[in-house]
Image: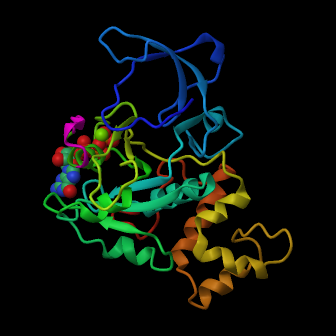
Amino acid sequence: MFPDAGPGSPTVTAMRARELGRKSVVVGDRVGLVGDTSGAPGALARIVRIAERRSVLRRTAEDDATTAEGRLERVVVANADQLVIVSALADPPPRTGFIDRCLVAAYDADIEPLLCLTKADLAGPEAVLGYYTELELPYVLIRPDSDLAALRALLAGRVSVMVGHSGVGKSTLVNRLVPEADRAVGTVSAIGRGRHTSTSAVALGLPPHRDSHDAPGWIIDTPGVRSFGLAHVSAESLLHGFPDLVEATVDCPANCQHTAEEADCALDAWVAAGKADQRRLASYRRLLASRSGEGDAREPERNPGDPLAGS
Ligand SMILES: Nc1nc2c(ncn2[C@@H]2O[C@H](COP(=O)(O)OP(=O)(O)OP(=O)(O)O)[C@@H](O)[C@H]2O)c(=O)[nH]1
Ligand SMILES: [Mg+2]
């Protein structure tokens, strides 16, 4: 009932059938259709079933699950294999706190992360990559004139979703990957904030990859987000976004909360011994704190040490 849309298959217009009740259909869902699926002009099909989701990428408006905003949970996309975390190296500046949040969301949803650093023509990647040295985080560097071979190879045959702040170049990249995509591209204002050019998530079929006989895969462009709320992720699961720290916690006392107030938390010794970056531990603890409403709600994804941090 959920066959793959092969190359050349028609684009079908479909409505959600009433029997789906309150279940909503999100980008990436595989659905069962009835009615006119010919794709002919004016043809309308109905979505009568949603297949079980292989993965669900969620985010909340805020981190604090005790507030109404915090509980407002959005499904970003279903069935993604790969989370492409798009961060510009300048204009707007990279925020490792934001990237850390995306990593938590990816590991929590069992989706593989890929760091995509755009605007490499404007600034070097050293500061960002230095922060992630301890992680085996795959990354690609993008500049306007770079050939996209490395990225294309990583996207081939998979469903990838791009997330990132507004103005980092997600739609620009999608247009390069899928020339007929024709996604609107914005200008970045002087203060480095885009104006949220894209307003909805759209999945686009990738062109076939020369080294792969699998289905070519999909890339999903999403609207820019200001922050990536994690109220839906338990305190325990937050740690999974920090594979460079997780090993240390086997030496923690039982029920250790890993906060700075825990006198015997093994994470401090781990960092002191040079096994992980102190800034990563600080970022993890900042996430822990923001769950209980103690964090800085204004700029939740800014870490000290980021360009412009503290300004
Ligand atoms: N210098 C430089 N500019 C780039 C690069 N990639 C994108 N841009 C510019 O950045 C601006 C924003 O690009 P978009 O593709 O609209 O950004 P977006 O991430 O889709 O933004 P939203 O849709 O608002 O989330 C445009 O003016 C692009 O031309 C790059 O690699 N280098
Ligand atoms: Mg866009």
Left or right: where 231 falls relative to 218: right
In the picture as drawn, the residue positioned furthest to the bottom comes out as 273
Q: Is residue 78 above or below residue 288?
A: above
Q: Position of residue 66 (x, y in %)?
A: 71, 39
Q: Position of residue 103 (x, y in %)?
A: 52, 59
**Is residue 184 part of the magenta span, yes or no?**
yes
Determine the image quadrant of residue 151: bottom left
Please name the residue shown 41% across and 55% down the image: 84
Of 306 and 121, which appears nearest the observer?
Answer: 121
Magenta residues span: 177-185
Q: Is residue 82 above or below residue 21?
A: below
Q: Is residue 131 visible?
A: yes
**Is residue 182 part of the magenta span, yes or no?**
yes
Q: Is residue 308 above or below residue 16?
A: below
Q: Quadrant of the N terminus?
A: top right
Ligand 2: quadrant of the figure: top left
Q: Position of residue 96 (x, y in %)?
A: 44, 63
Left or right: where 113 falls relative to 9: right
Determine the image quadrant of residue 188: top left
In the picture as drawn, the residue positioned furthest to the top comes out as 42
Determine the image quadrant of residue 40: top left
In the picture as drawn, the residue positioned furthest to the front comes out as 213
How many dots with numbers?
0
Please name the residue shown 69% across and 59% down the image: 237
Q: Is residue 264 visible?
A: no
Q: Position of residue 8 (x, y in %)?
A: 30, 33
Q: Quadrant of the C terminus?
A: bottom left
In the picture as drawn, the residue positioned furthest to the left comes out as 145
Q: Is residue 78 above or below residue 21?
A: below
